[in-house]
Image (cartoon, grey):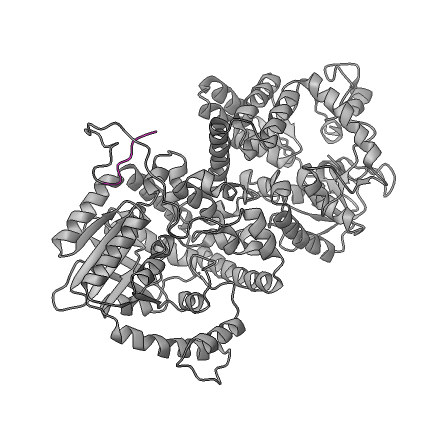
């Protein structure tokens, strides 16, 4: 919101919105996801451009909504879902591709490493757009993350159903984050950050997780007005 | 369900007077498609094995880098992948016709074709053929299909010794072990473990054997040479069966397979029905895709092809056993059937972050890793491998490398849905998870309910200390075993929004967050 309004755009948060339904779909409960898909389409159909600060939600909207609707023989919903999905962007896509901006006027004087979450990377192919945005943030010390493109192990309900494997993947991701000596690990998905941040917190590693949008929104100096660790 | 027709006389054939029936799954009690333990249990065991983790990490990292290098050399790699996918899709749509053409072509060239509905029939056919040849030992080419049906066990029960001749399969067999990778069955072993197995199990090996790879290979060579010269029956699988000429093809690295398909008088090939391809032009596409994807080589060292019997040259008795064993059941699912496109390159295993950490044994099937998680449950019926479709974080790395573009994450999600739907039909009471999901859907279908639920969840702040929650009740306890959970923030997004834009178009309530 802050970033987009700073860039002079009118932003609306429709209160009718709830959830894209990805968790239901990816856990096998497609029928339970149908009302959520319908709600998403109903809510956002009137808008010109839709943005979400989550690669996996946007990935689900783009790659799953119409598919689930068709599987339940609702062709009308499928077509509407496809049309709305075509106007739904992940934040870095919207900024770089649609609005043509890389420098959003942010200031963030911290050592930061970026984890490209799987759905941003592979489902949406956002490529280096988030890094291009981060490189233009003043004061930032951006350091590359080793094995960045390997999954952190979150995977939605995978993190609970296969908690041991998920944790083993997380251990390697944390090892790589710590090797960068960054103070902040950022990404375009709150859910992956909750997983990585939860592990780092348990280790008392002294590295916090901050969503890409919060860094791009930040204009204050270090410590002043800097947002707390993302937790949603 | 669109009808498939894989086996002649299958009741779903057009023109058949019998009504279509559900195609059968692979039978229980035979072969290696089912796990003893659910994936999370087996994975937990594997994750604790530091040697295994080290071996797997090293091997998969090496082979990943090799594959990436040789794939990047080809400017038309994406076109090749698209061609591979198109050929497989078209072939599956017309599988019965291609199989009948293959049958006719093999027969015309002096071979004999057998149709095996399942593992039991295939094992019986092969055992009878070996007995008819008067043999008590056979040499084997590395073959997933024969491992799938548990052929070695069936032969042993009939008093026939089967010798694996692929080096890695030999290591697995001598170690009384199970393969853990489709291409590198002993990937879980390092060279010092292999030396120990050879010293223990080979009666003809020098006690000074070192763990130098060349010394290990030489020991295996000496051991196997005697088997090649004495065996009268060879058994293989097939990477491809070319319908237009009846040609069978095995792709390998070592040349031991070449020995097995040329030296014995009798050659028996067990081939899954999905391995048929229409033409040699199609073979050209796959011979470019397969080696680069599997071993990271531009071309594999040995590609053996044979067409029926060549009088006076090579095996004079040639048999092809066409194996269904649940493949028709997979083909009946218009989405799930894409798993049958697999050419067994194992690229998806090597890039999978789950496989890299758990290894292949955790999947409990001869087909492990991402492709196994979508193939095994379809062959056995989902209820017999119900944990496998969930054994993935859906990261999508497998889809990126698949040479025939199988969308494995999409198939996983599809099979999860089929599993949930089947459970709903067959179970009298919904599972705790189903109730939770239904409740979540009810809440999330309405912003008012969501806001109320979120208000309630803010009581979670009581659980937190210094911004973290270290223990949650089940089922979320699995989360906090290794991860803290965030404390709900004091101000929700909706409240923040209200504070900044309370005047207008946005939020009408301030009860919840996000």
Percent position of residue B106, x then y: 17, 53
**In the rendered view, does B216 fall on the left or right side of B192?**
left
Residue at 51 percent across and 75 percent down: it is: B196
The residue positioned 82% from the left and 36% from the top of the image is B463
Apparent side of residue B432 relative to residue B250 in the rendered image (left or right): right
**Which contiguous range is marked in magenta?**
B1-7
Q: Dividing the image into 4 quarters, which one contains the N terminus of chain A? A: top right
Of B202 and B240, which appears nearest the observer?
Answer: B202
Residue A185: x and y in percent read 73, 47
Depth check: give the residue in front, A219 or A12.
A12
Image-based side of B233 in relation to B253, left or right: left
Q: Quadrant of residue B500?
A: top right
The answer to whether B336 is drawn above or below residue B242 in the figure is above
Q: Position of residue B213 (x, y in %)?
A: 47, 76
Can the viewer see residue A105? no
Give the residue drawn at x 81%, y 38%: A228
């Amino acid at each position: 919101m802050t970033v987009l309004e700073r860039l002079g755009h009118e932003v609306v948060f429709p209160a009718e919105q709830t959830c894209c339904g990805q968790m239901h779909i990816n856990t096998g409960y497609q029928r339970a996801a149908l009302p959520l898909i319908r709600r998403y389409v109903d809510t956002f159909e009137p808008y010109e451009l839709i943005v979400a600060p989550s690669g996996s939600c946007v990935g689900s909207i783009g790659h799953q909504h119409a598919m689930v609707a068709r599987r339940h023989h609702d062709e009308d919903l499928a077509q509407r879902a496809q049309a709305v999905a075509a106007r739904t962007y992940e934040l870095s896509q919207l900024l770089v591709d649609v609005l043509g901006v890389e420098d959003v006027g942010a200031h963030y004087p911290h050592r930061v490493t970026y984890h490209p979450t799987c759905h941003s990377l592979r489902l949406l192919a956002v490529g280096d757009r988030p890094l291009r945005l981060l490189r233009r943030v003043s004061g930032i010390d951006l350091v590359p993350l080793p094995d960045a493109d390997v999954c952190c192990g979150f995977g939605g309900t995978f993190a609970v159903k296969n908690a041991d494997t998920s944790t083993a993947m997380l251990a390697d991701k944390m090892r790589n984050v710590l090797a960068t000596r960054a103070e902040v690990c950022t990404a375009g998905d709150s859910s992956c950050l909750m997983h990585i941040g939860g592990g780092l917190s348990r280790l008392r590693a002294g590295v916090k997780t901050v969503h890409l949008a919060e860094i791009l929104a930040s204009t204050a100096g270090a410590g002043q007005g800097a947002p707390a660790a993302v937790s949603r | 369900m669109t009808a498939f027709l894989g086996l002649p006389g299958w009741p779903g054939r057009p023109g058949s007077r019998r009504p279509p029936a559900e195609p059968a799954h692979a039978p229980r009690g035979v072969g290696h498609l089912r796990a003893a333990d659910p994936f999370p249990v087996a994975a937990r065991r594997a994750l604790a094995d530091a040697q295994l983790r080290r071996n797997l990490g090293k091997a998969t990292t090496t082979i990943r880098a090799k594959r990436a290098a040789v794939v990047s050399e080809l400017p038309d790699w994406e076109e090749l992948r698209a061609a591979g996918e198109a050929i497989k899709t078209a072939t599956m749509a017309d599988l019965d016709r291609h199989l009948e053409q293959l049958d006719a072509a093999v027969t015309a060239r002096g071979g004999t074709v057998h149709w095996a509905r399942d593992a039991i029939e295939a094992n019986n056919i092969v055992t009878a053929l070996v007995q008819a040849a008067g043999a008590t030992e056979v040499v084997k080419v590395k073959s997933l299909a024969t491992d799938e049906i548990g052929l070695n066990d069936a032969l042993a029960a009939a008093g026939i010794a089967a010798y694996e001749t692929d080096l890695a399969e030999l290591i697995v067999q001598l170690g009384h072990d199970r393969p853990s990778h489709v291409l590198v069955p002993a990937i879980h072993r390092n060279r010092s473990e292999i030396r120990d197995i050879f010293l223990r199990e080979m009666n003809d090996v020098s006690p000074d054997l070192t763990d130098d790879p060349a010394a290990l290979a030489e020991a295996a060579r000496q051991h196997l040479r005697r088997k090649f010269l004495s065996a009268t029956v060879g058994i293989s699988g097939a990477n491809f069966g070319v319908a237009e000429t009846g040609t069978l093809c095995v792709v390998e690295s070592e040349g031991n397979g070449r020995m097995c398909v040329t030296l014995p008088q009798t050659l028996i090939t067990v081939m899954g029905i999905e391995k048929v391809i229409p033409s040699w032009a199609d073979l050209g596409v796959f011979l470019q895709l397969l080696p680069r994807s599997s071993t990271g080589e531009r071309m594999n060292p040995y590609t053996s092809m044979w067409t029926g019997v060549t009088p006076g040259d090579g095996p004079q008795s040639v048999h092809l056993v066409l194996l269904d064993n649940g493949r028709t059941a997979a083909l009946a699912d218009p989405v799930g059937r894409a798993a049958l496109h697999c050419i067994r390159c194992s690229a998806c295993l090597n890039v999978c972050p789950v496989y890299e950490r758990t290894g292949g044994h955790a999947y409990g099937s001869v087909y492990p890793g991402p492709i196994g998680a979508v193939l095994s449950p379809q062959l056995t019926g989902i209820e017999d491998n119900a944990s496998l479709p969930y054994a993935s974080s859906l990261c999508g790395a497998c889809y990126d490398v698949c040479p025939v573009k199988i969308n494995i994450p999409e198939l996983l999600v599809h099979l999860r849905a089929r599993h949930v739907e089947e459970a709903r039909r067959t179970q009298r009471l919904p599972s705790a998870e189903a109730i939770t999901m239904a409740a979540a859907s009810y809440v999330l279908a309405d912003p008012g309910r969501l806001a109320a639920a979120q208000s309630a969840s803010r009581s979670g702040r009581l659980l937190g200390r210094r911004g973290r929650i270290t223990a949650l009740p089940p089922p979320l306890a699995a989360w906090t075993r290794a991860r803290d959970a965030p404390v709900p923030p004091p101000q929700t997004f909706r409240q923040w929004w209200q504070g900044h834009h309370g005047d207008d178009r946005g939020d009408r309530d301030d009860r919840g967050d996000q």
